[in-house]
């Protein structure tokens, strides 16, 4: 009884159970908040559409076709990656439980990874929409920079040619003010949309953030346990591939989320 409750036996099961519970809580939270904030999500979409229409009037092209192609690629990539990770975990489970005859070793990896893949899909939706908001900030910034360049050029011409036609000056000034106030309004509207989007997905992202330290701890102890106990001489390639794959996925995921959030926050 004492050996069965040792650190080597108890800690991996405990950390695995905690990770599974955190994933379940994060997934349920995502579903509940998505339903609860469904009206706000639709309002964000409508307001972003209005921003796109205004930017089109100012001369910026829409990105609907590009977003459609990007969404298809993301969906295909997510599906392929989910099946690949499930296959990798199934192969590792077959090696580790090769002495067992139960069929659960084929099912457990898929059940265990379901919430992880669902959370990854929510993250992709959040990141894609936030990235699109960032591109709209870039377009507004371009219009502001063009205004500054045009104003500087106009002031130089006015200083060199004081006899410029008054009517042309008035038209140029009116157009400058229209673009300027439109750009300011668009920037403020994009800030509101970004805050609303953060409000909708903020709690889900915070719940998932609690998973990353647990994942790192679990993976480190998993490698330690393999090196010191079960596979002292040689570790199967499939197990190494599983460790490297999951570590790479989560490192890239954390980096992209932090990079896009920081980028939009600065804008």
Image (cartoon, rainbow, N blue to C red):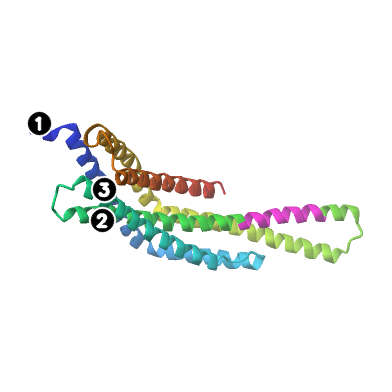
| Mark seen at residue 127 | none
Neighbours of disc 3 within 10 Å: few (<14), some (14-19), many (20+): many
| Residue in the image at 47% along x and 57% along y | 128
In the image, residue 262 lies at what x, y percent? 51, 46
Tell me: residue 205, above or below residue 73.
above
Q: Which residue is mark 2?
A: 110
Q: Which residues are magenta?
A: 139-154
> Is 139 placed left or right of 202 in the picture?
right
Of 150 and 213, nearer the camera is 213
In the image, residue 96 lies at what x, y percent? 21, 45
User: Residue pushed farthest front?
Assistant: 233
Q: Which residue is mark 1?
A: 2
Total marks drawn? 3
First in sequence: mark 1 or mark 3? 1
In the image, residue 138 lies at what x, y percent? 60, 55
> Is 6 placed left or right of 214 in the picture?
left
Calculate the distance from the C-alpha at mark 2 to the C-alpha at mark 1. 32 Å
Front: mark 2 or 3: 3
Calculate the distance from the C-alpha at mark 2 to the C-alpha at mark 3. 13 Å
Of 258 and 43, nearer the camera is 258
Tell me: residue 262, above or below residue 181.
above
Calculate the distance from the C-alpha at mark 1 to the C-alpha at mark 3. 28 Å
**Dot 3: what SS?**
helix
| Residue in the image at 26% along x and 36% along y | 226
Q: Which residue is mark 3?
A: 92
Of 257 and 10, nearer the camera is 10
Q: Are marks 1 and 3 in contact (CB under 8 Å)?
A: no
First in sequence: mark 2 or mark 1? 1
Asked if the magenta segment contains residue 164, the reply would be: no
| Residue in the image at 52% along x and 58% along y | 132
């Amino acid at each position: 009884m004492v050996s069965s409750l040792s650190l080597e036996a108890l800690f991996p099961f405990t950390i695995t159970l905690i990770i599974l519970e955190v994933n379940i809580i994060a997934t349920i939270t995502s579903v509940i908040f998505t339903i609860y904030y469904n009206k706000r999500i639709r309002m964000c979409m409508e307001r972003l559409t209005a921003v796109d229409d205004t930017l089109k009037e100012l001369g910026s092209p829409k990105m609907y076709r590009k977003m459609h192609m990007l969404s298809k690629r993301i969906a295909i990539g997510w599906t392929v990656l989910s099946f690949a990770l499930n296959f990798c975990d199934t192969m590792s489970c077959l090696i580790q439980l090769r002495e067992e005859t139960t069929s659960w070793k084929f099912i457990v990896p898929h059940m265990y990874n379901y919430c992880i893949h669902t959370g990854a899909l929510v993250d992709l939706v959040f990141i894609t929409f936030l990235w699109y908001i960032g591109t709209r900030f870039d377009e507004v910034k371009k219009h502001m920079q063009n205004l500054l360049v045009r104003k500087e050029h106009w002031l130089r011409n006015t200083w060199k040619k004081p006899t410029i036609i008054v009517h042309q000056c008035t038209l140029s000034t009116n157009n400058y003010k229209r673009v300027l106030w439109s750009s300011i309004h668009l920037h403020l509207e994009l800030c509101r949309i970004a805050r609303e989007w953060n409000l909708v997905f903020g709690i889900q992202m915070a719940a998932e953030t609690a998973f990353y330290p647990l994942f790192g701890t679990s993976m480190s102890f998993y490698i330690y346990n393999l090196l010191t106990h079960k596979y002292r001489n040689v570790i199967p390639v499939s197990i190494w591939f599983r460790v490297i794959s999951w570590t790479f996925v989560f490192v890239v995921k954390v980096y992209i989320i932090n990079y896009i959030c920081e980028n939009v926050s600065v804008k």
